[in-house]
Image: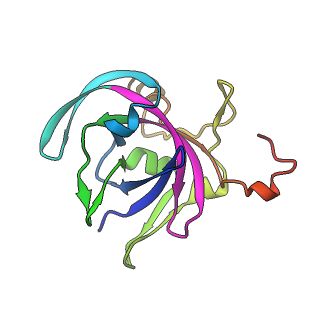
Amino acid sequence: MARPIVEVEIDGEKLNAILDTGSRRSYIRAEVAQRFPAVPVREFEVRLGGQTLRIQEGRLITGMVKDTEGKGYLFSAILFPVRDLGEENGRRIDILFGSVILEDWGTVIDDSVTPPRVDYRILREGTLTELKERQILRLRLSSAYPLGDLQGQWGINAVARSPVPDPQHTEGLEQ
Protein backbone atom coordinates (compact mmCIF):
# COMPACT_ATOMS: atom_id res chain seq x y z
CA MET A 1 0.00 0.00 0.00
CA ALA A 2 1.34 3.43 -0.92
CA ARG A 3 1.56 5.85 1.98
CA PRO A 4 -0.78 8.76 1.23
CA ILE A 5 0.50 12.31 1.41
CA VAL A 6 -2.02 14.87 2.63
CA GLU A 7 -1.94 18.62 3.12
CA VAL A 8 -1.70 20.08 6.60
CA GLU A 9 -1.99 23.79 7.29
CA ILE A 10 -0.32 25.25 10.37
CA ASP A 11 -0.37 29.01 10.96
CA GLY A 12 -1.19 29.56 7.28
CA GLU A 13 1.77 27.45 6.09
CA LYS A 14 0.97 24.46 3.86
CA LEU A 15 2.91 21.35 4.83
CA ASN A 16 3.15 17.79 3.50
CA ALA A 17 2.13 15.00 5.87
CA ILE A 18 2.47 11.31 5.22
CA LEU A 19 0.05 8.80 6.73
CA ASP A 20 2.17 5.89 7.93
CA THR A 21 0.19 3.02 9.46
CA GLY A 22 3.50 1.21 10.09
CA SER A 23 4.63 3.83 12.59
CA ARG A 24 3.01 3.93 16.02
CA ARG A 25 3.98 7.51 16.86
CA SER A 26 3.70 10.80 14.97
CA TYR A 27 6.63 13.06 14.11
CA ILE A 28 7.27 16.59 12.82
CA ARG A 29 10.37 18.18 11.34
CA ALA A 30 12.20 20.00 14.16
CA GLU A 31 12.44 23.17 12.04
CA VAL A 32 8.63 23.37 11.90
CA ALA A 33 8.13 22.20 15.50
CA GLN A 34 10.36 24.79 17.18
CA ARG A 35 7.65 27.48 17.19
CA PHE A 36 5.26 25.31 19.23
CA PRO A 37 5.29 24.69 23.00
CA ALA A 38 7.41 21.83 24.29
CA VAL A 39 5.65 19.05 26.19
CA PRO A 40 7.57 16.75 28.54
CA VAL A 41 7.46 13.08 27.60
CA ARG A 42 9.16 9.94 28.81
CA GLU A 43 12.39 9.65 26.82
CA PHE A 44 12.49 6.88 24.20
CA GLU A 45 14.50 5.67 21.23
CA VAL A 46 13.09 5.09 17.78
CA ARG A 47 14.51 3.93 14.48
CA LEU A 48 13.66 6.28 11.59
CA GLY A 49 15.32 6.49 8.20
CA GLY A 50 17.95 3.91 9.17
CA GLN A 51 19.03 5.90 12.25
CA THR A 52 18.34 5.41 15.94
CA LEU A 53 17.02 8.65 17.44
CA ARG A 54 16.58 9.60 21.08
CA ILE A 55 13.30 11.52 21.59
CA GLN A 56 13.24 13.69 24.71
CA GLU A 57 10.27 16.02 24.15
CA GLY A 58 7.04 16.42 22.29
CA ARG A 59 5.51 19.54 20.77
CA LEU A 60 1.87 20.51 21.03
CA ILE A 61 0.85 21.19 17.44
CA THR A 62 -2.45 22.72 16.34
CA GLY A 63 -3.42 22.87 12.70
CA MET A 64 -5.76 21.66 9.99
CA VAL A 65 -5.45 18.32 8.20
CA LYS A 66 -7.18 17.88 4.84
CA ASP A 67 -8.75 14.81 3.33
CA THR A 68 -8.38 14.01 -0.38
CA GLU A 69 -11.54 15.99 -1.14
CA GLY A 70 -9.85 19.10 0.29
CA LYS A 71 -12.08 19.34 3.38
CA GLY A 72 -10.14 20.52 6.41
CA TYR A 73 -10.40 19.33 10.01
CA LEU A 74 -8.84 21.09 13.00
CA PHE A 75 -6.57 19.02 15.21
CA SER A 76 -4.27 19.37 18.19
CA ALA A 77 -1.73 16.67 18.88
CA ILE A 78 1.57 16.00 20.55
CA LEU A 79 4.11 15.25 17.81
CA PHE A 80 7.75 14.32 18.31
CA PRO A 81 10.35 16.56 16.62
CA VAL A 82 13.01 14.94 14.42
CA ARG A 83 15.63 16.57 12.22
CA ASP A 84 14.39 15.16 8.91
CA LEU A 85 11.56 12.97 7.61
CA GLY A 86 12.91 12.65 4.09
CA GLU A 87 11.06 12.94 0.79
CA GLU A 88 8.41 10.91 -0.94
CA ASN A 89 7.42 11.31 -4.60
CA GLY A 90 9.71 14.34 -4.81
CA ARG A 91 7.97 16.14 -1.92
CA ARG A 92 9.65 16.98 1.39
CA ILE A 93 7.78 15.36 4.28
CA ASP A 94 7.11 17.77 7.16
CA ILE A 95 4.88 15.55 9.33
CA LEU A 96 4.45 11.81 9.72
CA PHE A 97 1.13 10.79 11.27
CA GLY A 98 1.41 7.33 12.84
CA SER A 99 -1.16 4.64 13.55
CA VAL A 100 -2.30 5.82 17.00
CA ILE A 101 -3.42 9.25 15.82
CA LEU A 102 -4.82 7.82 12.58
CA GLU A 103 -6.93 5.39 14.61
CA ASP A 104 -8.09 8.20 16.90
CA TRP A 105 -9.22 10.15 13.82
CA GLY A 106 -11.04 7.14 12.34
CA THR A 107 -8.82 7.33 9.25
CA VAL A 108 -9.87 5.21 6.29
CA ILE A 109 -7.36 4.84 3.45
CA ASP A 110 -8.77 3.56 0.16
CA ASP A 111 -5.74 2.36 -1.78
CA SER A 112 -7.83 0.82 -4.59
CA VAL A 113 -7.34 4.13 -6.43
CA THR A 114 -4.23 6.18 -7.19
CA PRO A 115 -3.54 8.35 -5.33
CA PRO A 116 -5.20 6.71 -2.32
CA ARG A 117 -8.37 8.38 -0.99
CA VAL A 118 -8.32 9.45 2.65
CA ASP A 119 -11.28 10.01 4.96
CA TYR A 120 -11.15 10.92 8.67
CA ARG A 121 -14.47 9.41 9.76
CA ILE A 122 -14.34 10.41 13.44
CA LEU A 123 -13.18 13.94 12.63
CA ARG A 124 -15.86 14.25 9.94
CA GLU A 125 -18.59 13.07 12.30
CA GLY A 126 -17.34 15.38 15.04
CA THR A 127 -17.18 12.67 17.71
CA LEU A 128 -13.64 13.58 18.86
CA THR A 129 -13.77 16.95 20.58
CA GLU A 130 -11.01 19.38 21.45
CA LEU A 131 -9.75 20.42 24.85
CA LYS A 132 -11.25 23.73 25.83
CA GLU A 133 -9.86 25.98 28.55
CA ARG A 134 -7.94 23.07 30.07
CA GLN A 135 -11.09 21.02 30.56
CA ILE A 136 -11.77 17.86 28.63
CA LEU A 137 -15.21 18.14 27.08
CA ARG A 138 -15.13 14.67 25.56
CA LEU A 139 -12.16 12.54 24.63
CA ARG A 140 -12.20 9.14 23.00
CA LEU A 141 -9.14 7.21 24.15
CA SER A 142 -8.15 4.02 22.43
CA SER A 143 -8.60 1.06 24.74
CA ALA A 144 -5.44 -0.41 23.24
CA TYR A 145 -3.29 1.82 25.45
CA PRO A 146 -3.68 2.19 29.22
CA LEU A 147 -4.48 5.72 30.36
CA GLY A 148 -1.21 5.93 32.31
CA ASP A 149 0.74 5.15 29.13
CA LEU A 150 -1.13 7.85 27.20
CA GLN A 151 -0.65 10.46 29.91
CA GLY A 152 2.90 9.52 30.84
CA GLN A 153 4.56 8.80 27.54
CA TRP A 154 2.31 10.31 24.94
CA GLY A 155 0.46 13.04 26.76
CA ILE A 156 -3.00 13.33 25.32
CA ASN A 157 -2.34 11.99 21.87
CA ALA A 158 -4.94 13.70 19.74
CA VAL A 159 -7.92 15.89 20.19
CA ALA A 160 -9.84 17.61 17.46
CA ARG A 161 -13.00 19.36 16.43
CA SER A 162 -14.50 18.90 13.01
CA PRO A 163 -15.39 19.85 10.42
CA VAL A 164 -13.92 23.32 10.15
CA PRO A 165 -16.91 25.68 10.14
CA ASP A 166 -17.51 27.91 7.14
CA PRO A 167 -16.85 31.48 8.40
CA GLN A 168 -20.03 32.66 6.65
CA HIS A 169 -22.14 30.12 8.53
CA THR A 170 -20.84 30.22 12.10
CA GLU A 171 -23.62 32.21 13.74
CA GLY A 172 -24.76 30.42 16.87
CA LEU A 173 -21.85 27.96 16.89
CA GLU A 174 -20.00 27.54 20.18
CA GLN A 175 -16.44 28.78 19.88
Q: Is residue 72 above or below residue 42?
A: below
Q: Quadrant for the C terminus, please.
A: top right
Residue at horizontal 66%, vertical 51%?
Answer: 126
Q: Is residue 51 left or right of 57 when viewed as pictured?
A: left
Seen from the viewer's position, the closer of residues 63 and 131 is 63
The main secondary structure of the magenta stretch is strand
Q: Quadrant for the N terminus, please.
A: bottom left
Q: Is residue 152 above or below residue 72?
A: above
Q: Is residue 81 left or right of 136 when viewed as pictured?
A: left
Seen from the viewer's position, the closer of residues 66 and 14 is 14
Count up the numbered dots.
0
Looking at the image, the residue that sits furthest to the bottom is 113
On the image, which quarter does residue 35 sit in? top left
Residue at horizontal 29%, vertical 67%?
Answer: 2
Which segment did they paint magenta? 57-79
Residue at horizontal 36%, vertical 56%?
Answer: 18
On the image, which quarter does residue 160 sit in? top right
Q: x, y (%) of residue 90? A: 26, 64
